[in-house]
Image (cartoon, grey):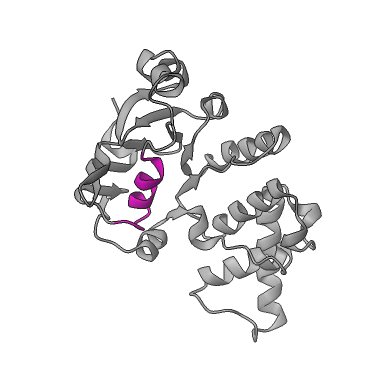
Amino acid sequence: MLVRSEIVLETEDLTKEFAGFVAVRAINLRVARGTIHALIGPNGAGKTTCFNLLSKFLSPTRGRIAFDGRDITALQPAEVARLGLVRSFQISAVFPHLTVLENVRIALQRVRGGSFDFWRSKRVLRALDDRAMAIINDVGLGPYADSLAVELPYGRKRVLEIATTLALDPEMLLLDEPMAGMGHDDIGRISALIKSLTDKRTVLMVEHNLSVVANLCDRITVMTRGHVLAEGDYKTVSEDPAVREAYLGTGHG
């Protein structure tokens, strides 16, 4: 049983209907601080809708969302991001024809209040460069600092997206299928990066593949057809007959 102070993100009866279709039904989610929590399920399970509700790109039909003990149900996406709950693409629109360093520096400029420092002194930009390089080195992109984003391999481009998100210094990251379209080596690299983040942060990630989260996540919530089917550690959910049916039986698709 989670102690209240350990919960960083919580939903209560979170529900979203579209013209009578219930996409997400009465989701009660609790994410513990400093953990990696996965939201998984077959296609059409409601994972992305749930993420859109948490990041405030959709408003719930019913229910509430609390972050760090504060009700954020009625807040706008930018307000939630300023509180420290950041979905990767909220600020990670990578500029393809800028370098890795320039991309991270622009993300840091947004932290300074939204203005771009094109006319700032070299001293100010130098300070941003130092901070940007620290983030770039932390995520393993040091050798690519002067490479254009468009020239990066797909997996490293996804790492750059995470780096620009980290520039906001968020308390919690929402990562929407960070492994999608990646090969084995890239999956290993992104997994190691995500695991390293929880020294200071909490991660909630949407993922389709059980095997990806097996060695990565502390807790897994399995969704199907808009509701929570099972929850627990990997061993618990992978051995659940209902989960096996959802992935392998008639519930798949």
Residue lying at the far bottom in this picture: please name it.
119
Q: Quadrant of residue 147?
A: bottom right
Q: Is residue 78 above or below residue 165?
A: below
Q: Does residue 34 show up magenta in the picture? A: no
Q: Does residue 50 show up magenta in the picture? A: yes
Instruction: Look at the image and give the residue range highlighted in magenta.
Output: 46-58
Q: Is residue 230 above or below residue 60?
A: above
Q: Is residue 63 above or below residue 112?
A: above
Q: Nearer the viewer, residue 184 or 160?
A: 184
Q: Is residue 49 left or right of residue 214?
A: left
Task: Count all numbered tags in the image, as a single digit.
Answer: 0
Which quarter of the image is occupied by the C terminus? top left
Q: Quadrant of residue 228?
A: top left
Report x, y in % for residue 73. 25, 55
Q: Is residue 45 left or right of residue 200?
A: left
Which quarter of the image is occupied by the N terminus? top left
Q: Residue at x 34, y 24 (%)?
A: 230
* Main SS class of the magenta portion in the image: helix
Q: Nearer the viewer, residue 211 or 201?
A: 211
Q: Quadrant of residue 236?
A: top left
